[in-house]
Image (tube, rainbow, N blue to C red):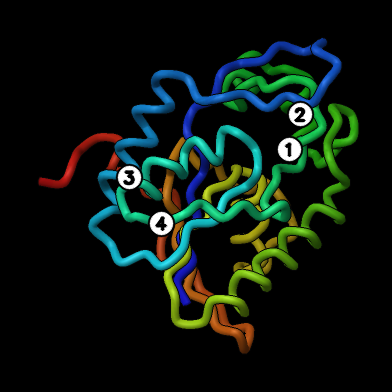
Amino acid sequence: MDLVWVRHAEPERIATGTGVPANPPLTAAGREQAQRLADWLAHEHIDRIVSSPQRRAVETAEPLAKALGLTVEVLDGLVEYDVQADHYIPVEELRATKDERWLAMVEGRWGEFGGEDPTAFTARVARTVDEIVTGHPGETVVAVCHGGVINVALAGVLGLTRPLWFDPVYTSISRMVASRTGVRSIVSLNERAHLEARRQ
């Protein structure tokens, strides 16, 4: 089966201190990114669309589902490792400002900002990938989720132990081919042509 990984579009920034898990919607730019994604992938044969339950992922998946006449199926196993964090600061901002949370993120100290244990997160993502692969033989499934989930899922194919090893941009597309026997390969990584051009 073909598993098409999509990172969510740009969400609104939520500062630290709300006291409740952050679940931001998309920005205006994010909604435009999601529509460009839909226009691009609507030309492909897609059987199913699954999504993290987090709002930014569902809102990214909805335009594509509408274009294809499909329903977005929510999978709890696709939530990001920091689902309990009370803030959403774009990774790009954390990196540019050398925020301590950026260093904690890349070093796997996720518990310092409300994140899941990296080992538990990796195991959860692996189980979810297995469920998608075994449950949809011969199909093309689009999974709309988060950068951390995509990093870990593809790291498993490459045999990497570092959980965060590349930077998927908003609505980037990465493709995996997988069989129920366990054979998996990466077809593409971080596609972003749809953000620059439209198909005619």
Q: Is residue 100 above or below residue 160?
A: above
Mark 1 → mark 2, Cα distance in angstroms: 5 Å
Tag 4 residue: 70
**Residue 130 % position (x, y):** 67, 73
The kind of residue on which mark 2 rests is: Leu
Where disc 2 sits, the SS reads helix
Q: Is residue 177 above or below residue 188?
A: below
Residue ID for mark 3: 38
Whole-Å distance between the Cαs marked 3 and 1? 31 Å
> Within the image, what quadrant is residue 101 found in?
top right
Mark positioned earlier in the residue sequence (4 or 2): 4
Whole-number angstrom distance, CA of label 4 to CA of label 2 = 39 Å
Q: Secondary structure at mark 3?
A: helix
Q: Secondary structure at mark 4?
A: loop
Instruction: Say left or right for 178 vs 23.
Output: left
Labels 3, 1: front one:
3
Query: How many neighbours does mark 2 have within 10 angstroms: few (below 14), some (14-19), or many (20 or more)?
Result: some
Residue at x 59%, y 18% (from the top left corner) = 93
C-alpha distance separating marks 4 and 1: 36 Å
Q: What residue occupies the far bottom of the structure in this picture? A: 181
Q: Residues within 10 Å of mark 4 (few under 14, many from 20)?
A: some
Residue located 67% across and 68% down the image: 159
* Vertical order, 196 against 131 (above or below): above
**Label 1: how many residues lie within 10 Å, few (<14), some (14-19) or many (20+)?**
few
Distance in Å between CA atoms under marks 2 and 3: 34 Å
Q: Position of residue 200 (x, y in %)?
A: 10, 46
Pointer 2 residue: 103
Residue beneath disc 1: 106
Q: CA distance from mark 3 to mark 4?
A: 12 Å
Q: Exactly how many numbered labels are in the figure? A: 4
Corner quadrant of residue 172: top left
